[in-house]
Every structure is written in structure tokens, then in C-alpha cells.
Amino acid sequence: MWTKICGIRDAETARMVADLGASALGLNFYAPSPRCISVETAGEIAAAVSKNDVVLVGLFVNHSLEDIEATCQDVSLDLLQLHGDETPEFLAELAERLPNLPLIRAFRVREANLESIAAYLSDCDRCGKRPDYLLIDAYSPDAFGGPAKWLPGR
Ligand SMILES: O=C(O)c1ccccc1N[C@@H]1O[C@H](COP(=O)(O)O)[C@@H](O)[C@H]1O
């Protein structure tokens, strides 16, 4: 099983979680989140773990293309997780700038109706870049993610 542990905030925890067998560590760069870390801390975490052991996922919410690019220059991330209102056009531009980094696109859903996601993916096809992975998260009115809620059932 592929397991991603999010919100890692220091090198020691990163090492421990990697040793316990996590496949990926989530590094949160979203400033309002209590799990947000600086680029410096992310660099320390990257240095503490072996690329052979874990994948490093950078979590961004409505960051600019330039911000994401700058972070990726400082920290050797393996995957990008976009959790905001990023458009299909944004994804296409990001993939052009950072072609080697697969994209996880998170969607916050209010009900078990995924038609809006299908429409988004069609737009992605039109723009030339589909997310490599989808993350379906529960909707919360006051958070872009991390509400620790279950998805609504049908
Ligand atoms: O963790 C956060 O604070 C966060 C903030 C903004 C966007 C996403 C965030 N977390 C990520 O959301 C998913 C689902 O988390 P949860 O199960 O709802 O707690 C996960 O990938 C977190 O890394």
C-alpha cells in the first residue's frame, strides 16, 4: 500500500516516519495552516531522508507559479499537491515549467457528485495537462484542506 503522511514539520519526525515505512511525506507550504513549514525546514527534512525510502510531496494552495518554482529550486520535491482553486490553465503552465514533477490535484467535494471534477478534467484535456493523481477530500467551509472530515456518502 502507498501511504502518504502529511504535515511533517521536522527532520527527526520525517526520519522516524520514513523508517516506519511511509511511502511519501507531505510538506505543507500553505502559510495559514498550522502544519506549514518554511523552505529551510523543508530542506532539512529532505536532507534527513533518503530519496530511495520516501517521496517528498509539496503541498500548495493558490500559490503563484513563481512561488512554486522558487520552492522547487530550494527543495528537491518529487510531487506537487495542489489544494486550492488552481485552474486547468494553471496546471498546464506549471507542467510546462516543471515537467518532471507529477501533479496531485485535490478536490473538496460537498456531496457524492463528481460531475464537476469530470468537467474540470475535460478542461484539462483542452489545456493539455491532466493531473497525474486526484485527491478527493471532504469539503469544509472554512479550510482548503486538512479538516479531518469524512466524505459525504450516498
Ligand atoms: O493540512 C492542512 O492544513 C492543509 C491545508 C490546506 C490544504 C490541505 C491541507 N492538508 C491536506 O489535505 C489532505 C487531506 O487531509 P485531511 O484528511 O482532511 O486531514 C491531506 O493531503 C493533507 O495533507
Image (cartoon, rainbow, N blue to C red):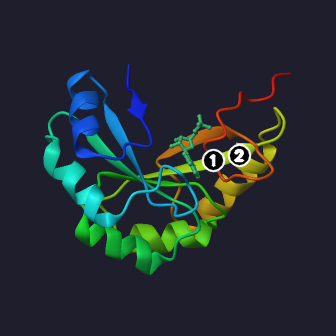
The residue under the point 60% across, 42% down is 146
Which one is nearer the viewer's eye here, 100 or 108?
108
Which one is nearer the viewer's eye here, 15 or 54?
15
Disc 2 designates what residue? 108
Q: Is residue 48 left or right of residue 79?
A: left
Disc 1 designates what residue? 145
Q: Quadrant of residue 80?
A: bottom left
Image quadrant where one finds the N terminus:
top left
Residue 129 x, y percent position in the rendering: 51, 62
* Disc 1 to disc 2: CB gap under 8 Å: yes
Which one is nearer the viewer's eye here, 154 or 50?
50
The answer to whether residue 127 is seen in the rendering is yes
In what element is the residue under mark 2?
strand
The residue under the point 45% across, 70% down is 94
Q: In the image, is residue 102 above or below residue 147?
A: below
The residue under the point 71% across, 46% down is 108
In what element is the residue under mark 1?
loop
The answer to whether residue 76 is seen in the rendering is no
Q: What's the CA distance linking mark 1 and mark 2? A: 8 Å
Q: What amino acid is labelled 2 in the image?
A: Arg
Residue 96 x, y percent position in the rendering: 39, 72
Q: In the image, is residue 29 above or below residue 47?
A: below
- The image quadrant where one finds ligand 1 is top right
Q: Is residue 141 left or right of residue 81?
A: right
Q: In the image, is residue 111 above or below residue 88?
A: above
Query: Which label belongs to residue 92?
Result: none
The residue under the point 23% across, 49% down is 45
Residue 32 x, y percent position in the rendering: 58, 61
Q: Is residue 137 left or right of residue 61?
A: right
Residue 42 x, y percent position in the rendering: 29, 56
Pointer 1 or 2: first along the chain: 2
